[in-house]
Image: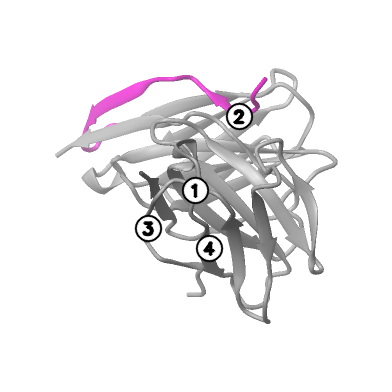
Amino acid sequence: SQQGEEDPQALSIQEGENATMNCSYKTSINNLQWYRQNSGRGLVHLILIRSNEREKHSGRLRVTLDTSKKSSSLLITASRAADTASYFCATAPYGNNRLAFGKGNQVVVIP
Amino acid sequence: EPEVTQTPSHQVTQMGQEVILRCVPISNHLYFYWYRQILGQKVEFLVSFYNNEISEKSEIFDDQFSVERPDGSNFTLKIRSTKLEDSAMYFCASSEKTGGNTEAFFGQGTRLTVV
């Protein structure tokens, strides 16, 4: 089974609102990362949270990690039209180099 | 800001033909990766490469695939005999340390279309 499974939602929000998306995984991890992908483009790294961290901030992004529930959330505050993209979580399991990606959440921010 | 570059951005090839996808990782990075994303699906790991050899590969990375670092800057993915199902976006990535301990930087991707 796949790790890094986001809740398969498509969010449509107004500019200025907050967007929250979730991710769950199944095995022990070293860290969890969030990426953004604009339509047809590459993956842009947003934030990495280590397994011993519970919360991390980067600008308008806030990531939480609950290793007991094997879940993470990404919050984008005060969203902008430019935040329109797909957001993926990716887990880095112990013992190997690969990142396991979820299916992604499509976020549309309406100006 | 350093970035991973991939060429070409889009390649169309006939089924059965060989293709080589090229990547220039970030210069001080030591770990290199290929991932692919079939349209509408997840990003899938293909292979990781370190110290001039494959360190890990997925079940997708069969004998039709090979990787090479022909010189100090390029990292290539070769598909020997393309199939229709190889049509996907192929991403190269690199990281300073192992992918499990640090962020991986991705290129813009090569969209491969097999006809």
The chain that hosts pointer 4 is B
Q: Residue at x 59, y 54 (%)?
A: B80
Q: Is residue A61 left or right of residue A65?
A: left
Q: How far is mark 1 from mark 2, CA to CA? A: 34 Å
Give the magenta part as a residue range. A1-18
**Which residue, given by chain and number where applicable, does mark 2 sit on?**
A4
Q: How far is mark 4 from mark 3, CA to CA? A: 10 Å
Q: Earlier in the sequence, mark 3 or mark 1?
A: 3
Q: In the rendered structure, are the residues bearing label 2 and label 4 in contact, judged by CB atoms less than 8 Å apart?
A: no
Q: Position of residue A12 (x, y in %)?
A: 25, 26
**Which residue, given by chain and number where applicable, does mark 3 sit on?**
B11
The chain that hosts pointer 2 is A
The answer to whether residue A100 is seen in the rendering is yes
Residue under disc 1 on the same chain as residue under disc 2 = no
**Which residue, given by chain and number where applicable, does mark 4 sit on?**
B20
Residue reaching furthest to the front: B16
Q: Is residue B12 left or right of residue B92?
A: left
Q: Residue at x 50, y 33 (%)?
A: B42
Q: Residue at x 49, y 48 (%)?
A: B16
Residue B70 part of the magenta segment: no
Vertical placement of residue A61 versus A41, above or below: above
